[in-house]
Image (cartoon, rainbow, N blue to C red):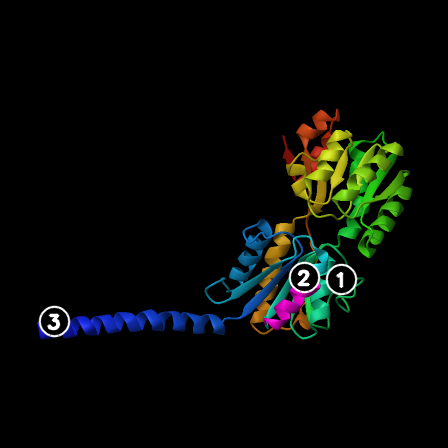
């Protein structure tokens, strides 16, 4: 009996010791893992397309969340004033890399918070004009990433809209009031002169301003609309549908919920590339030596159901160049 009790005490000690030792070992292992700071201006979406494709790129570079890296997510929930606070929090957390996504603002906040921690961005602007890098081939500082150069697409979107509704002479452009928006304005106006179209520029920085912007568009008798760089929102599609206004958008999300057409870079691919770049930096490469990646493929998506509802007969030539047609 005595020997049985002794064996039971030994097992209890072993199990009890293991219960303490394993969590300590796990915590030590986690502490040794590099930590990535993920800074996003939108609402929490850890399993959205952006983060899923980002983690895919990381995996291709040899890093899997929870296995050999940790990711600290910071979401601003469209409260732009919180971005500097969130960026500073990541710097205090001593992350190995900060990934700034979607717009210029997160990169601006991260860049203001640190000049030493590597920053990898993904957004639609021009990183040279925005002051993030010295030049595209050799960024030269602690910042690099993937840029869609969305401001360069305004003229192409206008041209596609003219193909969709060739009888329209006046086209509205819904623009942001930022420097990025001004760059798009100039590009669209230049394209309008070449195409012999009149462009009415209206501004709307958030959903509260969209109703007023659309009222201005209708007042100017615009026959079509180009949407500038905005976070995805159903509100713009709802207003375009309400006013029966043919519209081309900067993201496919809009077309998937009933928008007429979009012409844009495939954003999920951008975030996969950001994941790969982040992995390369974790392995020791410097942002200063990693060229900014520019997209090589853009997607034209057309919603035929919406075209039919608007009474538009889409030309076969336009359908032929579409990457995807939603019926």
Along the line of sight, the residue nearer the viewer: 106 or 121: 106
Where on the picture, by quarter, is residue 214? top right
Residue picked out by circle 3: 4
Tell me where residue 116 appears, x and y as whole percent.
67, 75
The answer to whether residue 1 is left or right of residue 253 is: left
Residue 15: percent from the left, percent from the top? 27, 69
- The residue shown at (35%, 73%) is 21
**Could you say whether the residue bearing mark 2 is in a helix, strand or loop?**
strand
Report crowding for label 2: few under 14, some 14 to 19, many 20 or more residues within 10 A (C-alpha).
many
Mark 1, other Cα within 10 Å: few <14 / some 14–19 / many ≥20: many
Q: Are the two marked residues, 1 and 3, in contact with CB atoms closer than 8 angstroms?
A: no
Q: Residue 89 magenta-drawn?
A: yes
Give the label, 2 or 3, closer to the camera: 3
Q: Say which residue label 2 marks.
A: 121
Q: Secondary structure at mark 1?
A: loop
Mark 1 and mark 3 lie on one chain; the one further toward the N terminus is 3
Above or below, 143 against 311 in this view is below
Q: Quadrant of residue 304?
A: top right
Q: Are marks 2 and 1 in contact (CB under 8 Å)?
A: yes
Numbered range of the magenta stretch? 83-93
> Quadrant of the image for the N terminus?
bottom left
Estimate the x, y position of residue 141 in percent, counting from the top left.
72, 73
């Amino acid at each position: 009996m005595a020997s049985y009790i002794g064996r039971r005490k030994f097992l209890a000690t072993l199990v009890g010791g293991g219960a303490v030792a394993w969590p300590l070992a796990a915590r030590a292992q986690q502490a040794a893992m590099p930590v990535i700071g993920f800074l996003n201006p939108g609402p929490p979406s850890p399993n959205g397309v952006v983060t899923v494709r980002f983690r895919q790129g990381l995996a291709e570079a040899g890093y899997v969340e929870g296995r050999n890296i940790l990711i600290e997510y910071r979401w601003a929930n469209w409260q732009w004033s919180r971005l500097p606070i969130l960026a500073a929090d990541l710097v205090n957390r001593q992350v190995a890399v900060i990934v700034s996504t979607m717009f210029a603002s997160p990169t601006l906040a991260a860049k203001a918070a640190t000049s030493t921690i590597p920053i990898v961005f993904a957004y639609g602007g021009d990183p040279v004009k925005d002051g993030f890098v010295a030049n595209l081939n050799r960024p030269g500082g602690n910042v690099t990433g993937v840029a869609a150069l969305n401001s360069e697409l305004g003229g192409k979107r206008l041209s596609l809209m003219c193909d969709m509704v060739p009888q329209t002479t006046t086209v509205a452009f819904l623009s942001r009031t930022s420097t990025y928006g001004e760059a798009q304005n100039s590009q669209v106006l230049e394209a309008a002169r070449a195409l012999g179209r009149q462009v009415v520029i209206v501004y709307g920085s958030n959903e509260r301003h969209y109703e007023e912007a659309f009222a201005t568009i209708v007042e100017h008798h615009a026959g079509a609309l180009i949407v500038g760089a905005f976070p995805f929102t159903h509100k713009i599609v709802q207003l375009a549908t309400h006013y029966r206004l043919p519209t081309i958008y900067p993201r496919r999300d809009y077309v998937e919920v009933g928008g007429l057409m979009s012409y844009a870079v495939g954003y999920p691919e951008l975030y996969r590339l950001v994941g790969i770049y982040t992995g390369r930096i974790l392995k020791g490469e410097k942002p200063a030596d990693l060229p900014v990646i520019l997209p090589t493929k853009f997607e034209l998506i057309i919603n035929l159901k919406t075209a039919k509802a608007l009474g538009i007969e889409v030309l076969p030539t336009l359908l032929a160049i579409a990457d995807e047609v939603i019926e």
